[in-house]
Image (cartoon, helix red, strand yellow):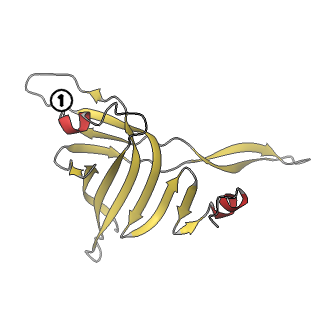
């Protein structure tokens, strides 16, 4: 088996939360479709619109981190980079490759576990207002997206639209 997740960590604003992060839910862009019936056709088709659903990745810390809580409710326009790094291991050859997922966004109010004596109480977070996303494996960028540009496997798939709109990317 290849690319088995063996370890992961979370970096926020240059701080490693690897000892605290318990769970990460990585969200990839999901393209939206609309139903369309071709003129005179008996069949309805789903057509990709080139727009994507909102990205709301989540993670959970085993702690009540004052550093993480300090990223809440910052001034409008202030964002943080959230970088999830993983070690993927190839069971056949033994090689290890990094997987890197980057989001730029803001933290929503956390969901805090109940307080129970003798039990840990963790904190769950959602990253909202994502304005940048990148996914790489082994140093190769597979997906990169911002509000005006999207690349897949290094190809700028939004170049034609940006050129038509006069954005000079094409």
With respect to residue 143, does 95 lie above or below? Answer: below
Residue depicted at 34% across the width and 30% down the height: 73
- Judge whether residue 62 can be spotted in this image: no
Q: How many marks?
A: 1
How far across and how far down the image is residue 13, in percent? Answer: 28, 49
Please provide percent x and percent y for residue 33. 67, 45
Residue position marked by numbered label 1 in the rendering: 121
Query: What residue appears at the point 33 percent right and 48 percent down from the top-left corner?
Result: 82
Q: Quadrant of residue 89?
A: bottom left
Could one spot residue 11 in this view of the protein? yes
Taking 156 as reference, is 116 left or right? left
Q: Quadrant of residue 121?
A: top left
The residue lying toward the viewer, choosing from 148 and 9, is 148
Give the image location of residue 137, x and y in percent.
38, 66
Relative to 7, does residue 32 appear above or below in the rendering? above
Q: Residue at x 62, y 64 (%)?
A: 169
Quarter placement of the C terminus:
bottom right
Q: Residue at x 49, y 59 (%)?
A: 144
Q: Is residue 106 left or right of residue 156?
A: left
Extreme-left residue of the structure? 118
Residue that extends furthest to the bottom in the rendered view of this protein: 93
Query: Mark 1 packing: few (<14 Cα in 10 Å), some, or many (20+)?
Result: some
Q: Decide: is 96 above or below 33.
A: below
- Taking 148 as reference, is 16 left or right? left
**Which corner quadrant holds the N terminus?**
bottom left
Label 1, secondary structure: give it.
loop
- Residue 124 as seen in the image, left or right of residue 104: left
Query: Residue placed farthest to the right in the image?
Result: 40
In x, y percent, where is residue 92? 30, 75
């Amino acid at each position: 088996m290849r690319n088995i997740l063996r370890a992961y960590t979370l970096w926020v604003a240059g701080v490693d939360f690897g000892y605290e992060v318990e769970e990460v839910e990585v969200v990839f862009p999901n393209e939206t479709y609309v139903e369309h019936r071709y003129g005179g056709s008996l069949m309805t088709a789903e057509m990709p619109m080139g727009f994507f659903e909102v990205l709301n990745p989540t993670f959970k810390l085993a702690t009540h981190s004052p550093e993480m809580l300090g990223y809440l409710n910052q001034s409008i326009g202030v964002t943080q980079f959230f970088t999830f790094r993983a070690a993927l291991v190839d069971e056949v050859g033994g090689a290890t490759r990094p997987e890197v997922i980057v989001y730029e966004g803001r933290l929503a109010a956390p969901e805090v576990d109940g307080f129970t004596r003798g039990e840990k109480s963790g904190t769950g977070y959602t990253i909202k207002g994502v304005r940048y996303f990148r996914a790489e494996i082994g140093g190769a960028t597979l997906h990169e997206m911002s509000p005006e540009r999207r690349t897949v496997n290094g190809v700028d798939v939004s170049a034609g639209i940006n050129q038509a709109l006069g954005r000079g990317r094409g």
